[in-house]
Image (spheres, rainbow, N blue to C red):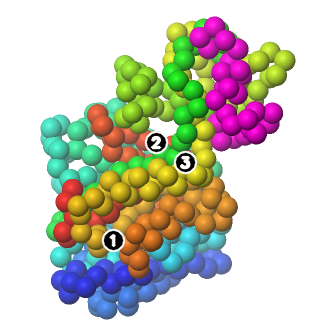
Amino acid sequence: MRIPEQDTAPLATGFATGGSPSPELAAAAVRQALARAKAPLARSVLLFLTPHFIRQAQAAVTAASRAARCLQVTGCIAPGVFTEDGWSFDAPAAAALVLCGDTVLSFRHSPPLPNDTQSPLLTLATPESLGEAWFGRIRPRFGLLSTDNDSERPGRVWTGAKLVNRCEAGFGGAGVAVGVSRGLRFVSPPLNVTDTDGHELFELAGQPALDTLLRGLPPELRDDPPLSHLFAGLPEPGVDAEQAIARGRYGLVPILGASSDEQSLTLAAPLSPGDTLFWAMRQPAAADEDTAALLDALSAGQPAPDFALMFACIGRGPYFFGGEDRDLAQVLARFPDLPVLGAYGVGEIAPLPGGSAIVSYGAVIALIGSHVQS
């Protein structure tokens, strides 16, 4: 936990967990944050709750608002929540950040103009609230889709201490440097689909599909490929495959099964002849390298941030790294005692070249501060 040196910008995080999803947990997280910030009240609060609160989200938000003596409470429900001090998936938990000085959440009361290219907006949304027009906006967005634990049902989003479907906010008095770590190794070049039947993929570039995958894997993985960490990367429509890889404009389709007899693969989405894909592998070492490179880029020529926000895939968190969130650990190694608020989910909103997008299996990191340049 870090309290910034500037008296004009006190802020801190709080984390509370318990056996039941009581609104008091949300209030406790806020009170802890206020005590750390040495402030009697907050000007803005960011509050993330686990899905245990889904039926009493409003009560929890109201309790947090009263504890903060502030109506500007924004946040959402997410499958997991964390701060620099701890994380929780399975137990009811609340994670809060209180902003008590010059840096505050800043909201628009009218839709942004299409050519608005100002500093990035924090976006929290239920899946159904983001229409096609939203993705075409130029102003960068970062944040999370709010869902329950199994991602089959929407979660809850709030702003102004009231439940909404979506909220977007900037940070008045601060700059935001944000990016995404995808954590992938690309194990093949782009390949054209030449033989497929729905979800069953038989040939790529005239070669057996399974063979094109195995050739790119390390020798020790070829006899028993880790299918749960392997994906077909599909470029966005209208985007050249090489450009899609370079700019991050691709989706990831899980591999459900492999047949050594037919040298085929079963994918989670159907393909058609003429489609293009590349093979990619999720790997902790690749994630470490990607996050290190991202932090280099975000912090180059910048002063230390006042706090950080992180939004990571639930499959990218501590369980992926063997019990420790190494993305968070890298942030804290760069900026010791930095207040960090974050959430784990199933759809990270990331700013990419050409517009914001929902990505999978990534980690979005935002460094925010009064002297940070967006």
Which residue is at the far front? 219
Task: Compare residues 169 and 22 and report the one nearer the observer.
Answer: 169
On residue 359, the disc is: 2
- 310, above or below 239, in the image: below
Which of labels 1 and 3 is toward the front?
3
Percent position (x, y) of residue 351? 33, 45
Q: Mark 3 points at which residue?
A: 286
On residue 307, the disc is: 1
Percent position (x, y) of residue 212? 66, 21
Percent position (x, y) of residue 59? 46, 72
Q: Find the distance from the CA under tag 1 to the CA under tag 3.
A: 25 Å
Amino acid of disc 2: Val
Amino acid of disc 3: Ala
Label 1's element?
strand
Amino acid of disc 1: Phe
Quadrant of the image containing the N terminus: bottom left
Q: Find the distance from the CA under tag 2 to the CA under tag 1.
A: 23 Å
Report the magenta residues as a range.
204-230
Residue in the picture at 24% in, 69% down? 303
Circle 1 crowding by C-alpha within 10 Å: few under 14, some 14–19, many from 20: many
Q: Find the distance from the CA under tag 2 to the CA under tag 3.
A: 17 Å
Evaluate whether residue 105 shows in this view: no
